[in-house]
Image: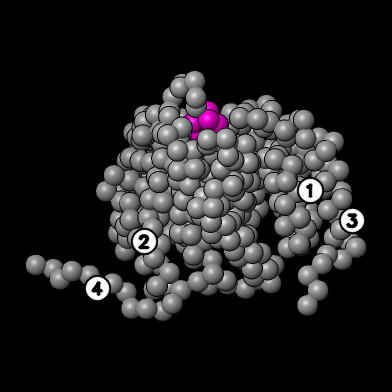
Amino acid sequence: MDLSYSPEYEAFRAEVRAFTKKYGDQAPRGAALGSGDMRSWQKLLIEHGYAARTIPKEYGGFGAEPDVLKSRIIAEEFLAAGLPMGMSGQGISMLVPTLLEVGSEEQKKKYIAPTLRGEIIWCQGYSEPGSGSDLASLTTRATEDGDDFIINGQKIWTSTAAQADMIFCLVRTEPDKPKHEGISYILFSMKTPGIEVRPLVTMTGRAEFNEVFFTDVRVPKSGVVAGRGLGWMVANATLKHERGMLGDPNQAGTRLKAIIELMKEETVDGGRLMDNPALRDRLLKLQARTIAMEYHGLRLLTAGIKGEDAGVARLIVKLMGCELNHQLAAFAIDALGELGMLYNGSPHLRNMGNWQSSYMFDLGLIIGGGTAQIQKNIISERGLGMPREPKPAKV
C-alpha cells in the first residue's frame, strides 16, 4: 500500500505552504467576530480557495470541485503554521450549507455571499425554556397578517444573539397540525422592532449565550425556507451541519499542537513536562484519538462527495468531538499542575487562562447542540437500529 501523495498533491501542498509564509502575518489574532481584520482574512482565504472552497462562485465561494486530499492538506498546513482557518459559526457553518441544500434561489443569492464574507452575523433560534431536548414541542408562534407573520415567544441559549444581524428561527406557524408538521424555519433581521436580547453569563465569566424575547415581531413570509410547515426537515439539515461544526477535528488538532508546545516549554523541578512519562503517556492517548477524528473526518468528506449517507459515522462526530476537546483542555490544566488552577489576572497565568476557559466552555458544548445523552440515543436508534426508548405510561 502506497500512502504517499502524488506529484499533483505535493505541488498543491507547496502552494498552500507558500501562502502561509507570505500572508501569515496578516492573520487575525483574537479578533472579534465579524471585525474588519477577520473579514479581510476571510476575503483573502476565499480568493485563494482556502475558505468556502467548494461553494459555487455565483454565491460568493471559490467554486472548486470537492477533493478530500486537498481539504486535508489545507488543514494540515494551516495547523502547522499556527494560522486560523476561515471564519465559522452559525451562519457560515450551519445556515450556508442548509440554504445550498433546501433554500430558494433568491435566498441563496441574497444571503450566502455576504455571510461568507462575514458581513452578516447570524444566530440560531431553536431552544426554548420548555423545549430543549424535545425541540419539536416549541411554542414560539406566528400568526398571519397579510404578507407578514407576527411572532411572539421566547428563545434561550442563543449564541451570538447580542452581535447578530440576522436569525434563522423555528416558529410554530401551523397550530392545528401535529407538532413536527406545524413548524416553519424563518429568516429575519435581529433589528426588527419587538426583539429583546438579554445576555446570560456562564461560569466562564462571559455572556456567550442569550435569552431572546419576541413581542409582536413583524417579519415577511418570504423569509420561510423550503415552505411552511417544513421547518422540522430544515432544522434537522441544519443540526447535521451544527454537529459537524462542534465536532470539527481541526479544533482538536489545533489544541493538541498547543499542548505539545506547552509540554516542551514548561518545566517542573528543571525537567520538561514532555519528559514526564506519565504525562507523555496521556498525551499519546489523546493524540491517537485526535488523529482518529481527523481520519474519520476524511471518511465523512468522501461520503459527502459520493452523495452517500454516512449513517452512524456521521452521528458520532458531535459526541466524540466535544468530549475530546473537553478532555484535551482538562489534560492541559493537569499538566500545568498548580498553575493550571490559576484564573483571572494572576501573574503566573499561562495562555491568558485559555485552558481554564476552554475547559468550562466545552463542558457546556457537551450539553449544547444536543446533549451527550441525546446523541447516544440518536446513535443507537437511528444509526444502530435499536428500539426507541419506551415512553412512560400516561396516568
Q: Which residue is mark 2?
A: 374
Query: In the image, is 263 to the left or to the right of 79?
Result: left
Provide residue 335's location: percent of width, then percent of height.
Answer: 49, 43
- What's under tag 1, amino acid-wise? Gly
Label annotation for residue 176:
none
Question: Disc 4 marks which amino acid?
Answer: Pro
Do residues under tags 2 and 3 come within 8 Å of each other at their CB atoms? no
First in sequence: mark 2 vs mark 3: 3
Q: What residue sits right under mark 4 in the picture?
A: 390
Mark 2 / mark 4, whichever is N-terminal: 2
10 Å neighbourhood of mark 3: few (<14), some, or many (≥20)?
few
Q: Which residues are magenta?
A: 350-357
Looking at the rendered structure, the secondary structure element under dot 1 is loop
Q: Amino acid at mark 3?
A: Ala
- Residue marked by disc 1: 49
Residue found at the very far front of the displayed protein: 269
Q: Residue placed at 68% from the left, 31% from the top?
A: 28
Which dot, 4 or 3, sits closer to the camera?
3
Foreground mark, 2 or 3?
Answer: 3
What residue is drawn where x is 41% and y is 51%?
366
Q: Is most of the magenta stretch helix, strand or loop?
A: helix
State the residue in front, 336 or 247. Answer: 336
Q: Residue at x 73, y 46 (%)?
A: 80
Q: Indicate yes or no whether the magenta region holds residue 141.
A: no
Which residue position is annotated with label 3? 11
Quick one: SS at disc 3? Answer: helix
Q: Is residue 136 above or below residue 59?
A: below
